[in-house]
Amino acid sequence: MFGGKDQETEKTYRVGKQVLRESELKIQVTYKGEVFTLLYPTPLRKSMIETEMARRFGGLPRSSFSQEHIALVEACVIIDTLMIPKECPSWFTTPWECVDENLITEIYQGYFQFRDRFRERLRSNGAEGGGKGDSP
């Protein structure tokens, strides 16, 4: 096999004519000198996010909760679902137990910044079709 034993096989995704390596889908956010890594979601992971959010809201409509609560739940669910534990600080096991809301906000914003740049990259390369959505 090419590259010897040190070369790992990296998962790839095909989008139109583009082939994306999993490393290109990693979202890295640095906060106070520590790196937190998430993986951009596939449709399956997006579905898992929506299902978990519905579970966290107990089936009640979002209008039953404050905007601040909705944002915190969404941020925690997205981070918890997409984080790569071995590529985050060992003390950070879940956002649900993190008392630093600024950290949660920073990672959450990093996800959306990456998502917007990634979608634009796909559009500019003609790989993304359909309309624009607001889903995670």
Image (spheres, rainbow, N blue to C red):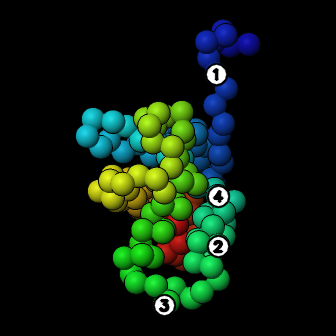
Q: CA distance from mark 2 to mark 3?
A: 15 Å
Q: Amino acid at mark 1?
A: Glu
Quarter-of-image position of residue 127: bottom right
Which corner quadrant holds the N terminus?
Answer: top right
Count neighbours of disc 2 (C-alpha within 10 A) and say few if under 14, some if 14 to 19, many if 20 or more. few
Whether residue 43 can be seen here = no
Count neighbours of disc 3 (C-alpha within 10 A) and say few if under 14, some if 14 to 19, many if 20 or more. few
Q: Amino acid at mark 2?
A: Arg
Q: Which residue is mark 4?
A: 45
Q: Is residue 4 above or below residue 42?
A: above
Give the residue drawn at x 42%, y 75%: 69
Q: CA distance from mark 1 to mark 2?
A: 37 Å
Q: CA distance from mark 2 to mark 4?
A: 15 Å
> In the image shown, does 46 or 15 lie closer to the viewer?
46
Q: Position of residue 89 (x, y in %)?
A: 43, 35
Q: Amino acid at mark 3?
A: Ser
For marks 1 and 3 on the same chain, the one whose residue lies earlier in the sequence: 1
Of all residues shown, which one is farthest toward the right?
A: 1
Q: Which residue is mark 1?
A: 8
Q: CA distance from mark 1 to mark 4?
A: 24 Å
Residue mark closest to the camera, 1 vs 2: 2
Q: Which residue is mark 3?
A: 63
For marks 2 and 3 on the same chain, the one whose residue lies earlier in the sequence: 2
> In the image shown, does 96 or 10 lie closer to the viewer?
96
Q: Position of residue 107 (x, y in %)?
A: 38, 53
Q: Which residue is mark 2?
A: 55
